[in-house]
Each structure stands twice: as C-alpha cells, then as structure tokens.
Amino acid sequence: MSGRARLALCAAAATLMASCALLPLVDPATWFLQAAFLLAVQTGVGAAARRVPLARPLTIAVQALVTLMLLTLSFAREQAVAGLLPGPDVFRYFGELLQAGADDVSRYSIPAPLSDGIRLMMVGGVVVIGLAVDALAVTFRSAAPAGLPLLALYSVAAGLADGGAGWIWFLLAATGYLVLLLAEGRDRLSQWGRVFGGGPRAPGGDPSGSPTAPVRTGRRIGAVALGVALVVPLALPALDGGLLDAARTGVAGGSGGGNTISAVNPLVSLSDSLNVDEDREVMSYRTNSEETQNLYLRIVSLDEFDGTAWKPAKRHVEDVPGSFPTPPGLSDDVRRTEVQTRISAADWYAQDWLPLPYPASQVGINGKWRFEPVGRTLVGDHGQTTRGQEYTVKSLIVQPTADQLANAPEAPEVLKREFTKVPNSLPPVVAATARRITADSANDYERAVKLQDWFALEGGFTYDTEVKVGSGSQAIARFLRDKEGFCVHFSFAMASMARTLGIPARVAVGFTPGSPKSDGTMSVGLRDAHAWPELYFEGVGWTRFEPTPNRGSVPDYTRTDTPGAAVPDPDAPSRSSSSEPSAAPSGSEDCTAAEKKLEQPCASESPQAAFGATNDDPPWWLSLLLWLAGGLAVGTLPLLPMLWRLRARSVRLGSHHWTVANAGGVAGAAGQDADGDTAMDLRLDGQGRATEARAAAVALEAWQEVSDTAWDFGIPPDESQTPRKAAARIVRVGHLEPEAAASVHRIADAVEQVLYAPSPRPAPGLGADVRRMTQGLRATASRGTRLRALLAPRSAVRVVWAASDRWHALKYRAAARWTALLRRPSSQGGTGG
C-alpha cells in the first residue's frame, strides 16, 4: 500500500473515531454504519482521483459530487433525477429534512430517536467533516490543520451530550488525530528512502541515531500530549476538573468545582418534557395554603436579554443552605404568609431545575443540588434531575398593597443597571409603545399595571398557540404589530418594555398552580407550562405580573377599577388544566415536517414555541455552516503562510523525482512520485532541447527552494551574489555539515550550468540535495528558529510581492491601452471644400 493511500485510511479512521462522540446522542446507532460506508466510498474516490492524477481542487470536487449523489440515493431518491442525480427538489427536500431534524433535537431528550432528519444531520455531518479532513491531510499533505474539523465534530457532540463518560470520546478523537499525525510523519520520512532497522545498537549508543527514532519520538510526544490534556486540568480548579469531570453533563451544568451555572436557554430543556402530544401529569402537590391561585411553581428566571431571546445569565452557585436568606428587597412592612408544600415529580419528568413556589425559604430534598442565590433556584449537580423526586418546600406568599408598590423607592443602582439593560438592536417601536401606553402614569407601579392591562385587556391581543411570530431582533415588534401569541410572547414583550421604562424586569418560567383533585392534592400537567414577567420594586422585591389573557391569575395587587374590565377569575384553573390528564392533543394544526411524517398530532403548547422556536432568519443549519466556516477561517488564517510554504515546496520539488537519460540520440525522462506511482513518460527529440529546458527548470526551481529555505531559517537572499558565493554564504552562516554543504554546492553548480554553459547537463538528485540542506539547517538551528521557519516562514512575503507586481502590471497595461486610445487618429477627414 502506498504512503498516500495509508494516510487516506488514517484520515477516514480519525474522522470515524471523532464521530464516536455522537453515538450517545441518538438511539439506535445504525446511522454510524451508514456514515462509515459513505466515508469509505468517499475515501476510495479520493484515492482513485489522486492516482489518475487529477488536480487537487478537482479531486475534492469529485469526492464532494460522489458524496452528494450517495446522500441523494440514501435520503432523497424520489426527488432526484433518475433516482440519483441531485436537482433543486433534492436540495429543497434536504432543507426540509434538516429543519425537521432540528425540531426533533429540540423536542426529545438524549438519546433522541433516529428520525430521517436527525439521520441526515448525523450522516451528512460526518461525511462533510471527513471530506475536509481528507482534503487537508491527504490531498494537500498537511495533517496538522485537519485537527480543526475533527475538533469541531467533537465539540458539537460534547456540547450536546449529557453522559458522564465524555472523556472516553475525547480519548478516541485524540487518538485518531495522533494516528493521523503519525501516519503523515511516516509518509514524509519514507520519501527520504527506505528505513532500515540495522543491526543491534551498541551499548551506550545514541538512540536518536537509529532511523526509527523519529517514529518512536512521535509516539512518545503524542502520548505525552494526550496525557497532559487529560491529567493537567485536574490540578487546575478554575477549569472545573478538566476532561475527566462529569459535571459538564446536563443542561444546567452546575458543579461543585467551578461554582457556576452556565447561561443556557431553559425553553429548550423544557421542550424535552413539555412538547409532547398529551397533557400528562408533571407533578402533584399538597399544600396548607388556602390561596393556591398564587402558588406558581417557578423553575428558573431569565434575566439576560440580548435582543433575540431571554436566557439565564451565568451565575455563582453554592451549597443549598438550611434556610434561604430573606428575598432581596422585601421589607418587614409587607404582609407575608409562610406555607408548606409537599411536591412529587413524575417518574418520567427529568428537569435540571427544581420547580419551587417563589420565594422559597427552605427546601428539604435528597440528591445533589446547588443553590443559585440571585434567582433563588435549585439546579441539579452532576446529572441530578427532578425525575421521581419528592421534596418539601417552605415558601412565602407575599401580599403587598397597591400603595406600597406605588410608593416604592428607587431600586439600588447596581440592580437597576443589570436588570434594565436592553440591547441596541431592540427596535425603537418597543420603547415608543411603552411610553405611549404609560404616558399619564405617576410612578413605576402604575406603568407596570398599565402594561399588564394593555396586554391582557385593552390592547386587542389574542391568545393563540398557532401563531408563528419568528425570532430575531424584530420578533417583539412583529408581536406588537400582529397582536397574536401566548404566554412567552406576552411575558417577553412586557419585560422588554418595562426595561425601556427603567423598571428592573426579568422573565420567569415554570407552571401555573394546576387543578385540584378529589383527594385534596393539586395536579400540574404539561399544559400548565407558563412564563410570566417579574418586576422589581424596592421594599417588595421581585413581583409577579400576568399580561397573558386567559392564563393563570391576575395578582390582587394589580387589579384595576376600570369599568367593564373583564379580569379573569383568580380562582378558576388554567384554561388547559383539568382534574384528570387529558389524552387529547393541543389544538395546533400547524405541524412540523417530522410530525407529519410520523403521522403524529401536533405538539402541545409549551414555551418551546416562543420567539426562538420559529424564525424568519436564515435556517439554523445555514447559520451553523456559516459559524463553522467562520471558525475554520479564523483558525486557518494564522496557518496560511505555513500552508503556502508547504505548497510551494511541494510544487518545486515535485519535478525532482525524475532522472534524465540519453540513449541513442533519443532523450527520455521517467520517474516515480513519492507513492511509487509512475508519473510520466516523456519522449524528447534527438536534439535534446526538451531535456535542456527541463533541466534548466529543475535547477532553477531547486535553487529558488534553497534560497527560500535559507531565508526561512534567518539567512536572507542576496541577489548581488553569484550562485557559488551565495551557496558558500549559506554553508557558512547556517553552519552546515559537510554532507549538507556538498548538496548546496551541487545545486549551485547546476544553476551555473544553466546560466553559463552552452549545453547544460541534467543534474539528477537535486530534490534530495534540497532536503539534505533543509535537514542540515534544522539540525543546527535553535528550537525557536525552527518553529519560526515552520509557522511563520519569512519567504511567504513573496506572495505579497507577487500580488503587488501583478497589480502594477495591470495598472501599466490599463494606462498603456488608455494612452493608445487617446492617441488614435481621428477618423473624421480634414479636407476642406
């Protein structure tokens, strides 16, 4: 097997080993076999194209075309031309499948079922990454940058997986990459000739003198690098335990090591449990409170607004205290009642945040939980969820009066600065509408009540779960214009408008109180999922408002005396709640592509259908591709000088595998490339003119490579010197050993033959001479010089010079043509009558 074919197999193996990190995400894992088959075909096509040989860009294009045809055959045969050739219908269907896959990813918990959309995402992603790895490592002969697409593949899997064995997948991916690097090193080493093991090494001999030492050294370096990546983070607390730490699993990711909870969107994690077809019971509870209409079960608060969505900010977490501190901003003058609630979560309901009445003062629960003091929430640690949990909560029912809220002093500056922040991308109509609605208000309390009543009563809004509002910076503006939506739209819009008025605001996500059962308990179902705004008033603290019409209950402290105001009955249960779980699906008929394909009813109402669920922006997969392309571009940009230098060296030395011989007046040239494949059989005329031209080109290219290599190692070229003097200077400044020095002088002699001899003789072995000279410079240079020569070669400036020369030549030709046009004689005759 040739070296390049072996390298191609290693590239495919590295891609498959990195893609193993995706295995825990989907069940069953049969997609992996399909991806492996397509990757094998793609690798074989690349090997065949390189053996022809085709140009490098054409090789990649052929691989991409064959891969696209195979994907078409596997996923879109009915939409294809003749069942195989992709056309516009195929790409349109691929887009629908990818969108359906995105819907499935957001609907299901890990492991997700293997729908057609998810299968296309998995298989297509693996073969695209495999194509990038093969192109970089094999076609362009540069395995080091191939780690970037492998890293992107592993990072996607690591960001989504919630298992505790992430280090195993990292180990596989890292091993695949190291195998790829080792294969490239062996391939490069083989180009110097066959490696012989030789006889037994003498005692005390230098092990580095063995031809196999580079291979053993590469293995050792790889093992050390892998060990450092796995073990060193354990000694760095700031890194939260490193790759061996399982605390990074789960959506919340709070851990004892890092003491932080990441900023993630709970609407997505809620959709795993909420976005199903029947109103199943999520939890039940028993309480000693007589006012259950105000007992909202709050999961988490969304306090960071970026103009597109609300999400929880990254917060400090700590051990769960025995008694929670007094809620921020709550004074002793405000009436409060402490109640106790016993909650039982369903065995199937797995949520990282613990549903609690707000504000909780004490929680009794088993398991690994952490306390986030700003939002007063409990978050699971090391994969802890609510599944089957039974816990007791003591909480406060805060009952402020309208006067206390109206006379509330200014909020602390620190709190106000954080919770009134709005992005510049927020459309001006949001703030303008808020000012118009609250124009005659005397204080923040009146402004808040007017906003609530405008949404719930006076503004003409319709509660509709089938609405498709979209996402992006214009989402709230569209909602204010169309006036259709449900709880998430109303809460997001009111909180945003309150912030523009200088009122600290955030959004809470959780459940309404649910419905009473005959045994005295309360039942909370999926359709009780809800979101509502919380506004801060000094002396009262974070205060719930209810802008969503026909949902939840309007707090007593926000009731108005407006005649005819149809305030919902606070004692009535939520519209979608019932005493028993309902088997009927929700009313939306606007199903996703995946739901139609599976012939399932539409998903039930949940916060997943919020601003971030449907959008008018570019498709998610296009955004993902753009982000990946941008990341690869940024990561590759610093490597461009190195890649150009490797390419230039490969082109210059590619012709040096030839040996030229004259026999019987007929000159012939034949040779083999680095893989041992016959490359050319060139027949020349009897005069040998083609041989002389070829010899001249080979010598000049070799000398150019000698000059650039010496320049990369700190010996700049001197155009005023003859080749012989320049060679002597390189030998002297570079401290070359006799063998490398002789190689430089042989190349200089070949150049002088080309420049001065009437009939220059072909000089065989110039490519080997260039490599010996390069190895000699590396042997005498310092480590920093070697790194500089590899990563930032000085000779790469020739690219800039060449571009400048082309630009000046272009300007000169344009000026010359313009001058000739102006000097052209007039075609109008000059003879008078």
Image (cartoon, rainbow, N blue to C red):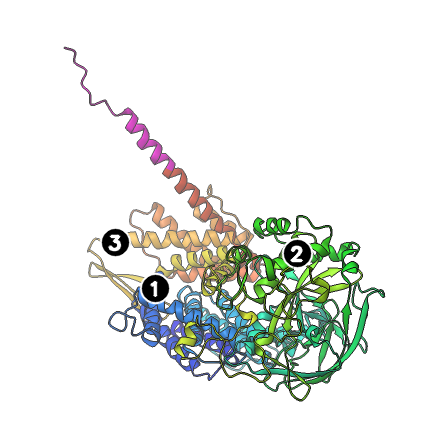
Q: Amino acid at mark 2?
A: Lys
Magenta stretch encompasses residue 52: no
Q: Could you tell which of marks 2 and 1 lies nearer the N-terminus? A: 1
Q: Could you tell which of marks 1 and 3 lies nearer the N-terminus? A: 1
Magenta stretch encompasses residue 820: yes
**Nearest to viewer (mark 2 / mark 1):** 2
Residue that numbered label 3 is attached to: 690
Q: Amino acid at mark 3?
A: Ala
51 vs 173, nearest the viewer: 173
Task: Check disc 2: other Cα within 10 Å, few if <14, some if 14-19, many if 20+.
Answer: many
Task: Check disc 1: other Cα within 10 Å, few if <14, some if 14-19, many if 20+.
Answer: few
Residue at the extreme bottom of the image, as rendered = 519
Distance CA(mark 2)–CA(mark 1): 62 Å
Residue that numbered label 1 is attached to: 61
Q: Which residues are magenta?
A: 811-833
Q: Could you tell which of marks 2 and 3 lies nearer the N-terminus? A: 2
